[in-house]
Structure formats: structure tokens, C-alpha cells
Image (cartoon, rainbow, N blue to C red):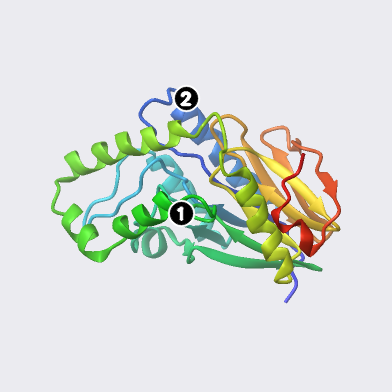
Amino acid sequence: MTRSTPVFFISDAHLGAPRLQDDRQREKQLIAFLEYAAAESGEIYIVGDLFEFWFEYRQVIPKHNFPILVALYRIASSGVTIRYLPGNHDLWIGDFLRDEIGLHVLPRATEVRQGAFNIFVTHGDGMAKRDYGYRVLRRILTHRLNIALYRWLHPDIGIPFAKRMSQVSREKGQNKNPFDADYREFALSKFAEGYNGVIMGHTHFPLHEIYDDRHYINLGDWIRHFSYAELREDGPVLRQWPSKTVLIEPKTKKWTPDALSLPIK
């Protein structure tokens, strides 16, 4: 089934990060963007890490950034479809965003069809071949027993502690992307499977490359770049808010199966 409406993708806002002094302003910018996407009758994909940390206790959620939750509820209630894919800072999504806010919470990856385009979408954490440590850590953090044990911590202790640890994790990789070639190779492998587009987040570095009409996009972030992807029938474009101008003119490269291990220079 093809779509005639635009599809918008964002990732890595990390709202609620303790050391980011412009948190409220970034939240307002993001709400304005979501309202714009809704006015365009678009479908919205949040591709992970909307919050610096998200963990649902059975009766408690983090209290900060309540305005974005209100905006998401209002937009979803108006009939706009908002889909949420978890990232590495929101591994522990429970029922709240689905049942109370009205979001469509998806597994780690999905595909989006628009016209002739079949796009593979995922946050991107754990996709780098050499990121062995994170894959082990993810298994530990998502184990049911460990989640149950964490809920024994009082929220006033558990949530601030996790935010501090999340801050350290995010800041560690904010100035470089050591797995750039791995993410590119992953995208090329999805092309080999038949997709003609891959959209990811996680790295915080906006990127748009085209291999024989196959698009590889990294969404960047809403900390420094305020970048988002817009998908229409003629293909995806990486733009910047609030100007809505093209953020990066895509690099065009020749694609062959032999390119799978070759980084772009």
C-alpha cells in the first residue's frame, strides 16, 4: 500500500538531559515541529531517544518534559499517526506511551513504504559490528529480572541516577562517530536485501548518501542540528528546523555488492 501523505522522521532529542541548559527551548522547538508535521497531515516516526532516559514504574513515569507528552497526546488524539521506535536511552518503554498517550510503539525496526520507496527504519544502536560491549550491555539492561529489580529503587533515586549515567554515555560519543564505516556497511547490506532506503539515528551526525537511487540517511539530533527527514513520493530529504531547508545535499555514489566493505572517502 502506497502513501500520498508525507512521512516525517526525528531522533535523538534527549529531552530531560540534566546538563543541557536549553532543554525547555529545545522542547518548544520540537513541539512546534510536531504541530507542523500534523498540519501537513503527515505521519510521524520518532526513531528513538526522545528522552535522555525513559523508564516506567508500574504507577510512576518521569515528571520532566510533561509539555511534550501533552503535545503528543493532543496530536495523536487528532488522528495523526505517531510511531515510536525505542533507542538505547528508552529501552524500557512500557504501556504508558501506547495506552495513555496514543502512540504506536514498534519493535526495534520497521519498514515504511512511500511510492516506489521501501525504507528500513531503526534507531541504529547495536548495529555496528564492532560495538560488542553495547550488545552485551543491552542484553543485561533489558533482561526481565534486572528490570524488575530496578523497579525496587524508589523513583526519586532510580530516575536521577539513570539520567546521570545516560548523560555520561551520550557525551562520550558526541564529538566523533567511531563506527561510521560499520553503520554505512549495515545500510548497504539492507540495500542488498532489497530496500532502497535506510533511515537511522543514534550517531547524532546528520548524513545523507545515495547509492544508485538508494538512500542512506542518519537523522542527526535535536541537540545541535535540529534535523529531520521528510519522505514523499519522490524520495527522502534531510532538512533542518525551523527553516525547513535542506540540511545536507546528498553525496551520490555507485553501489554494487562489492561496496559493502568500502567506506566513503
Q: Position of residue 172 (x, y in %)?
A: 44, 32
Is label 2 in a helix, a strand or a loop? loop
Q: Which label was assigned to residue 37?
A: none
- Residue with the most extreme bottom position: 1
Q: Is residue 83 left or right of residue 56?
A: right
Return the residue at label 1: 73
- The N terminus lies in quadrant: bottom right
Q: In the rendered view, would you say 229 is above or below 157?
A: below
Q: Residue at x 25, y 65 (%)?
A: 144
Local secondary structure at mark 1? helix
Q: Nearer the viewer, residue 34 or 193?
A: 193
175 w.r.t. 156: above or below:
above
Query: Which kind of residue does numbered mark 1 sit on?
Result: Tyr
Residue type marked 2: Asp
Query: Label 2 crowding class (10 Å Cα cut-off): few <14, some 14-19, many 20+?
Result: few
For residue 91, above or below residue 117: above
Question: What is the C-alpha distance between the residues marked 1 and 2?
Answer: 23 Å
Residue sitting nearer the eye, 251 or 93: 251
Q: Mark 1 vs mark 2: which is more N-terminal?
A: 2
Q: Where, by quadrant of the figure, is residue 18 drawn?
A: top left
The answer to whether residue 244 is above or below residue 123 is above
All told, the count of numbered labels is: 2
Q: Is residue 153 left or right of residue 207?
A: left
Looking at the image, which residue is at 73% across and 50% down? 262
**What is the x, y in percent for residue 9?**
63, 51
Residue 42 in view in this figure: no
Marks 1, 2: nearer the viewer: 2
Q: Which mark is residue 22?
A: 2
Residue 100 in view, yes or no = yes
